[in-house]
Image (tube, grey):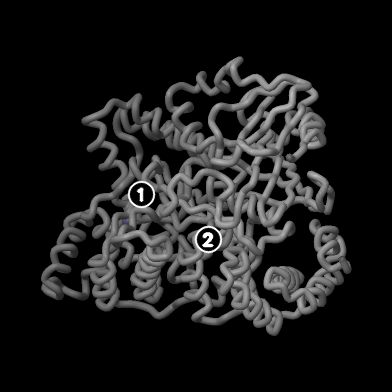
Amino acid sequence: MRPMVRLLAAVAAMATLGAANPEREFDLPTYTGAYQPQNVDERGMWMVDDESERLTRDSRLVIRDEALNNYVHSVLCRAVGNDRCGGVRIYILRVPVFNANMSPNGTMRVYSGLLLRMRNEAELASILGHEFAHFEMRHSLDEFRRKRSTSDLLAWTAVLGTLAATYGGGSTQSYGDFRISVYGALFRFSRDQEREADILGFSYMAEAKYRPSAASEVWRSAMNEADATSTGRALRGQRYDKTAFFATHPTNLERADYLSALANRVPGGEYEGRNAYQAALAPWLDQFLEDQIKLNDFAGTEYLITRLGAEEWTAPLLLARAELYRLRANPRDLPNAVEFYRQALTLNPDLPTAYRGMGLSLMRMDRKSEATPSLSRYLELKPDALDADMIRSLVAPQ
Amino acid sequence: MLKSLLKPVLLISAAAALTAPAALSANDLIKSGETVAVAKSTLSITPPRDWNKLSARPGKKAETWTLDGEQLNDISFYSDIAPGEPLLRERSKKRDPLPKLRSNSLLTDVPEFLEGTYRAHFGIAVFSLGASKPTKFLNEPAIQFTYEYVTPDELTRRGEAIAVLRSGKLFMITYDAPKLHFFERNIEDYRAVVASAKIA
Ligand SMILES: [Zn+2]
């Protein structure tokens, strides 16, 4: 059976649960190699894509840490196999949103907000695999051909050029409004394409022996986080297209269910890679958490920190949670912040930021005598802190 | 003050050649030596040189001046920001809420308040606060601080600000300019504006 036919068959099988041969459902199709542009339009699109990649490569937002890049690339290779991953160029962008994408010329963009949200290697592999599946099945090219019939190449070039010129080619203008994401508008996959990518994604997971349920868990948690953000902002309805990733990968509650059902049927491994993942992310964790906290999305951030903390409340997570509460600073937030700082310091007494935050929180609660020792400790640990003079002015007797 | 980030996109997509800042209208001229009230408040400035006032206000209680064009060397005035209020006008109160000043906010909270506002409003991923130190502003204990950030056009910008809380209300003047060339060139013009500030 041709790969596409088998995929479609698998999709059909999903509807009639178990009707297809369950042993073959998640077999990997033969990889035909990277696709090359076939006609003048596609060559035009490739040129624009190459230019977009060049701008991404030079972007100030690219995280150039070799160890982190090697690790993410190795996860893609483990997920989709060495014959598939070889030509892929991955760019990790410091942008605090849940997103990743792959364009037709083989460029994969991975956002720091995605890395922050993954609990283990299996979860990351499921997202990278899903992106690669769209690429292998040339979904964005189908979309290009479809839209090409109603608009001319120049218009496409203008839009892709714009995309390339902003934030390393692929981010959005405002974290808050993903409707204006050019990428989302261009490469919004259809529901059928999503199903195809989900199935091929599970096939990679099975082949690589990753725990398949990681895939459904990561999608569900991203949807839950979007719900938390909406609830926190008193927005009505379950809308997922405000999340960058879902702007290109349309989703709904039914999808979370069918992913779980699929995950249960996928044969395969138990490999999760939690330790390897956390070790690779460790040097960047504090930075990514800080970028997230400062998005002013209290409820969504609280959801994601709690999800990460459910596995283990580490000092960095407790510190981040404390900072989140302190920065919102509703009257009831400040005592909570103080408690989280205290817990973080119990695990790691050498966190200057925790003493600072605890002292500032107590100061705002009019508990200056308790605040002073904390702030003094901060100054002892970091006498040259950039805000040392200001903090000293708080501690000094008035 | 930066404009909404949608704007650069529209400019670029219209045509690369159209990215020059729009010409400044003569009506908006702030003449040197003349005392003007800023941001619809009792805060007044007597600038030692001419400035251009932008017609678009970044917030209800805010106003921006520039020398050479928006985003090249901007001074923004924020006046009388009360607890519960954001620094800038929110695009959408529900969908894109901005940080709010709190009744228990301290001077030490002001840099983070500005940082949170910039990150959320302008979609800035890379932002770092520089040094802060105590100073005097409008005859009261105040904070002076610096910051640096990368805008979506991939330019690094620097900022310097001075702020005071008077009965819990925030008064602040900021200076934002590209790090390369512009920041150093006009920082003293900004400081001269700050030095001329008075409040009724
Ligand atoms: Zn997808």
Q: For the image shown, how many numbered marks are present on the structure?
A: 2
* Mark carried by residue A46: none
Give the camera-side residue of B9 and B171: B171
Rendered-image quadrant of the C terminus of chain A: bottom right
Q: Nearer the viewer, residue B189 or B4?
A: B189
Q: Are marks 2 and 1 on the same chain?
A: yes
C-beta proximity under 8 Å, tags 2 and 1: no
The 10 Å Cα crowd at callout 2, few under 14, some 14 to 19, many 20 or more, is many
Q: Position of residue B130 (x, y in %)?
A: 76, 50
* Above or below for A130 versus A345: above
Judged left or right of residue A318, residue A366 is right
| Residue shown at the point (38%, 78%) measured from the top left | A269
Distance in Å between CA atoms under marks 2 and 1:
21 Å
Task: Give the camera-side residue of B106 and A133.
Answer: B106
Q: Chain of mark 2?
A: A
Report x, y in % for residue A93. 55, 51
Foreground of the two, A146 or A43? A146
Q: Which picture quadrant has residue A369?
A: bottom right
The residue under label 2 is which amino acid type?
A: Val
The reply to whether residue B114 is in sight is yes
Image: A167 above or below B182:
below
Residue A151 place in picture, x, y as percent: 26, 28
Question: Under tag 2, what secondary structure?
Answer: helix
Residue flagged by tag 1: what amino acid is it? Answer: Gly
Q: Quadrant of the rendered structure where residue B191 is?
A: top right
Q: Which residue is mark 2?
A: A72
Give the left or right position of residue B68, taking residue A107 as reference: right
Crowd tier of the residue under label 1, counting other residues whose Cα lies within 10 Å: few below 14, some 14–19, many 20 or above? few
At numbered mark 1, what does the secondary structure look like: helix, strand or loop?
loop
Mark carried by residue A33: 1
**Residue in view at x 57 percent, y 56 percent:** B100
